């Protein structure tokens, strides 16, 4: 990250060394003079932050809108980034937010550097704290632990933030807090804080009454994304009591204790991280829908492997209702695996597999060096000896030029006198390959002397024509020069 040399970054810190009577330049945000930014990265971690945990998006947005005035560089984009974080808080029961930089850039329509800068502003204001830093470590191996094995895949570790409320916000809002740091809890209000809380409640109620549409209690509001296809689970002619009795006959339910419910929710969250279409669902409702399989002893790996094979509609509104409906349908048609499914957990690794890999690598390395020092020279010498022996046993190579057609057929198509004074191409090639002088060619029969005399006469006639042509050319040039001289001198 490039250093930030923007003037006024630390202008909001209160300077106790200066005299109060010394005139200073007034800031456009006077409230920022009483708040010290958290610039040390060690103080921005979840284990060392002075801010308390927040789980509700409305509380985080209220703290962000109030605290943004304390930073000289924060503004409307900071509020937009805080709103994007608040929209993701419902996905975790602790309110943690996974910081996907590319998705946030596409959502807000700003550059990567702008997103990183305003995330730093939120950390300096004490509104978010690091739960986990993003890295290239395989998060799948971390979650599986000893059960991690070949074929489990790779997924990088994401940056996770925890929305928090700084102590200055609680003090200004009149909150009574017990404890310090991230584990601090809101236990009440002061008189001023109670008046603020009552005014906020009345304002929300007034907006709810004037808002169009029917308002539902949080227990029946679907937690998944809007504009998704609704899953129809059956006819509505059955009464509620008859449906409950039918469901009890289909799925024998055993009572869950509070600890077992907590374990089921944690197991469901593991399944949600592996199955993409369960990510936006409520973990509590999904754990209730998967309770029959969880009670039967199914593990997170087995549940994820089973749910990954289900066909899901393109737009799913309520994933928990779909799981409940699909489980009931598959149970009626006997399509579910038995209580002991075929998909089982991979055996745990206590480190012996890694040690065996190191031993095997060391063994292979020593074997290679032993081969390079002892066996390889002997093999090369033996290979060279066999090649020499093969060359000695083979007969001497006789050069035989390859022609496109037999030489006898080619020579038979030519007059005999053509090769009278020169050797054949085969004789020439053989002589060149063996380093010898070529012969004188073939002997011509006596009956062909007339043809040879005709060729000599033809050559003599051609030479006479060439001499005559040269003489005529010289005479023509002399005549042309004389004509040009007479034209230049008319006298």
Image: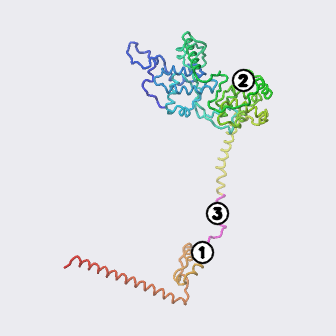
User: Toward the viewer: 159 or 427?
Assistant: 159
Q: How is the image coloured?
A: rainbow
Which SS class for mark 3? helix
Q: Position of residue 273 (x, y in %)?
A: 66, 32
Q: Position of residue 105 (x, y in %)?
A: 53, 33
The residue where tag 1 is placed is: 405
How many angstroms separate mark 2 from mark 1 (CA)? 94 Å
Compared to residue 414, the image places residue 113 above or below, namely above
The residue where tag 2 is placed is: 261
Q: Which segment is the magenta one? A: 382-400
Q: Main secondary structure of the magenta part?
A: helix
Which SS class for mark 2? helix
Evaluate whether residue 311 shows in this view: yes
Q: Assess disc 1: are there few (<14), some (14-19) or many (≥20) residues with their C-alpha within 10 Å of its C-alpha.
A: few
In the image, taking residue 229 as reference, residue 84 lies left or right, namely: left
Quadrant of the frame with the C terminus: bottom left
Evaluate whether residue 273 shows in this view: no
Compared to residue 330, the image places residue 209 above or below, namely above
Query: Is there CB contact under 8 Å for labels 2 and 1?
Result: no
Residue lying at the far left in this picture: please name it: 491
User: Toward the viewer: 457 or 258?
Assistant: 258
Residue at screen point 80% across, 27% down: 249
* Sequence-wise first label, 2 or 1: 2
The residue where tag 3 is placed is: 388
Q: Nearer the viewer, mark 3 or mark 2?
A: 2
Residue 383 covered by magenta stretch: yes
Query: Is there CB contact under 8 Å for labels 3 and 1?
Result: no
């Amino acid at each position: 990250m490039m250093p930030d040399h923007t003037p006024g970054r630390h202008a909001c810190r209160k300077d106790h060394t200066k005299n109060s009577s010394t005139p200073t330049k007034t800031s456009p945000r006077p409230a920022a003079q009483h708040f010290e930014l958290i610039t040390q990265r060690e103080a921005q971690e979840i284990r060392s932050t002075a801010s308390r945990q927040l789980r509700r998006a409305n509380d985080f947005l209220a703290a962000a809108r109030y605290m943004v005035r304390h930073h000289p560089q924060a503004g409307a984009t900071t509020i937009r980034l805080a709103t994007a974080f608040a929209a993701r808080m419902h996905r975790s029961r602790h309110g943690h937010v996974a910081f996907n930089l590319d998705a946030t850039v596409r959502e807000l329509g700003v550059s990567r550097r702008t997103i990183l800068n305003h995330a730093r502003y939120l950390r300096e204001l004490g509104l978010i704290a690091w739960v986990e830093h993003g890295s290239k470590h395989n998060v799948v191996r971390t979650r599986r632990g000893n059960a991690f094995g070949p074929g489990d895949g790779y997924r990088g570790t994401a940056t996770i933030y925890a929305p928090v409320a700084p102590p200055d916000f609680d003090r200004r809002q009149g909150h009574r807090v017990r404890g310090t740091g991230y584990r601090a809890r809101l236990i009440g209000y002061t008189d001023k804080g109670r008046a603020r809380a009552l005014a906020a409640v009345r304002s929300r109620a007034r907006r709810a009454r004037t808002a169009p549409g029917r308002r539902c209690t949080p227990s029946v509001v679907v937690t998944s994304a809007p504009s998704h296809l609704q899953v129809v689970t059956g006819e509505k002619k059955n009464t509620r009591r008859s449906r409950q009795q039918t469901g009890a006959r289909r799925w024998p339910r055993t009572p869950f204790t509070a600890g077992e419910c907590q374990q089921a929710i944690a197991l469901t969250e593991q399944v949600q991280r592996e199955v993409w279409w369960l990510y936006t669902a409520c973990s509590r409702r999904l754990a209730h829908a998967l309770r029959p399989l969880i009670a039967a002893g199914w593990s997170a790996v087995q549940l994820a492997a089973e749910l990954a094979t289900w066909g899901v509609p393109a737009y799913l509104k309520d994933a928990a209702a779909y799981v409940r409906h699909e489980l009931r349908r598959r149970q009626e048609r006997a399509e579910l695996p038995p209580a002991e499914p075929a998909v089982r957990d991979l055996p745990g690794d206590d480190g012996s597999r890694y040690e065996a890999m190191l031993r095997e690598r060391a063994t292979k390395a020593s074997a290679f060096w032993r081969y390079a020092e002892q066996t390889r020279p002997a093999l090369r010498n033996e290979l060279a000896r066999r090649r020499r022996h093969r060359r000695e046993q083979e007969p001497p190579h006789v050069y035989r030029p390859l022609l496109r057609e037999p030489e006898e057929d080619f020579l038979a198509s030519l007059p005999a006198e053509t090769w009278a004074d020169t050797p054949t191409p085969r004789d020439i090639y053989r002589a060149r390959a063996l380093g010898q002088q070529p012969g004188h060619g073939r002997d011509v029969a006596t009956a062909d002397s007339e043809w040879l005399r005709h060729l000599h006469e033809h050559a003599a006639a051609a030479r006479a024509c060439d001499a005559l042509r040269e003489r005529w050319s010289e005479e023509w040039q002399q005549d042309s020069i004389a004509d040009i001289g007479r034209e230049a001198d008319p006298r």
